[in-house]
Amino acid sequence: MAEVSVGDLVTDARLATELTRLAGEAGLGRPIRHPRVQKSGLALAGHYYGVVPTRVQVLGETELSYLDTLTAEARGQAARGFFSLGLSCVVVTRRDEAPRAIVQAAEATGTPLFMSAARSSRTINVLHATLDEKLAPTSSLHGVLVDVFGIGLLLVGKSGIGKSECAVELVLRGHRLVADDVVRCEWRPPGMVFGAPADMLRHHVEVRGLGVLNIKDLFGVTAVRDRKRIDIVVQLEEWDEKSEYDRLGVDDKYFTILSTPIRCVTVPVRPGRDMGAMLEMAARNELLRRAGKHSARELLSRLEENAGLTPDVAIEDQPESVISAPVRPLSSHESAPPPPNSSIARPEPNPVWNDSERQQPAARPSYERSGESSAWIPAVRPKGGD
């Protein structure tokens, strides 16, 4: 079980200016094993059931106002009973000074006692954020973590597949390296996994043939970062002609880190593929998916509509003849062509005529003026004449 000492907790930058120690210096080495604080108001009344000693105990305005209603003797007895439980530490909030009975009981039992002038809600939020980081489950993975367009891409694959080379290519394109070779993963609520580099390998990348490179020295501070949430896992593997790779991207696959499923895509590697562009496209597609745009599913939806399928009919279960281009609807004066191999008589194609057999158009009659009349009458010509 993960734990952090009281001394390590209160020396964190977020709590160093928030808390003031009043008593119990001897107990700064006591362990804290739970990421959530506890407000045990009933414990001051003598009901100790449910008090977890390894949690940070917070006494706010409600608990302290109850102590103010007691006599001095009863107040001291309540404080001694509460601090006799072997608590890791106690934080008093929203007070300029703690009750004397509380301070005396803390000194007598060696329990660290701190005070904060802020409200209980603010102090609890800061404590939770710090404890989440200090007590987070951790693990280490072999891979490379890069920040691409704000998306954390974790590249995994066997050694020598080209993960570090892909990271260098992405840095050349303006993206940021987080960790190479060893990625320290930390779980954060509510179900997020963050990656960070190992302390000895921070800002360094190892490329076969070139050796170890310091990305921060080569490209500046804007090319690196110390921590990033892992949003998508990219599995790099050698191209195999016999393998069936996903060509639609409809079904999601997941990679589990610290019991947290993270979407995973498999990208085959072979000479000639622009892996930098492929990884950028993976990050851009993840941004689209987060915005509610799923390209593959939208395409299948359009195919279903054009094929006349209902949404509950899977497009992949239909024969190829069903998944075809849309047919233009016939107008009112058109008729559908007969199906293939049918017995319906089809019209013969237009014959090809020779010049001698081609039907000549009828001769147009000629007209001439009759005498002095202004009327035109057909002219009669003898047969065979011009």
Image (spheres, rainbow, N blue to C red):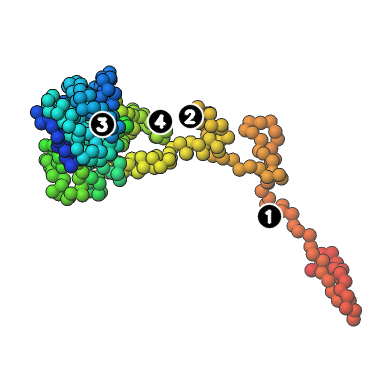
Q: Amino acid at mark 3?
A: Asp
- Looking at marks 3 and 4 on the same chain, the residue that comes earlier in the sequence is marked by 3
Q: Residue at x 11, y 40 (%)?
A: 211
Q: Amino acid at mark 1?
A: Asp
Callout 2 secondary element: helix
Which residue is disc 2 drawn over? 316
- Looking at marks 2 and 4 on the same chain, the residue that comes earlier in the sequence is marked by 4
CA neighbours of label 3 inside 10 A, class few (<14), some (14 to 19), many (20+) = few
Which residue is disc 3 drawn over? 68
Of the numbered discs in the image, which one, if any, rests on residue 251? 4
Residues at marks 3 and 2 touching, judged by CB atoms closer than 8 Å: no
- Looking at marks 1 and 4 on the same chain, the residue that comes earlier in the sequence is marked by 4
Q: Nearer the viewer, mark 1 or mark 2?
A: 2
Q: Where 26 falls versus 213 (above or below)?
A: above
Q: In this image, 304 relative to 139: left or right?
A: right
Q: Amino acid at mark 2?
A: Glu
Task: State the CA–CA distance, disc 3 to disc 4.
Answer: 62 Å
Q: Amino acid at mark 4?
A: Asp
The percent coordinates of residue 252 (x first, y second) are 38, 31
Q: Residue at x 30, y 28 (%)?
A: 260
Of the numbered discs in the image, which one, if any, rests on residue 355? 1
Q: Residue at x 69, y 37 (%)?
A: 346
- Judged from this view, the residue extending furthest toward the top is 49
CA neighbours of label 4 inside 10 A, class few (<14), some (14 to 19), many (20+) = few
Between 184 and 62, the one lying in front of the other is 62
- Looking at marks 3 and 2 on the same chain, the residue that comes earlier in the sequence is marked by 3
Q: Nearer the viewer, mark 3 or mark 4?
A: 3
Of the numbered discs in the image, which one, if any, rests on residue 65? none
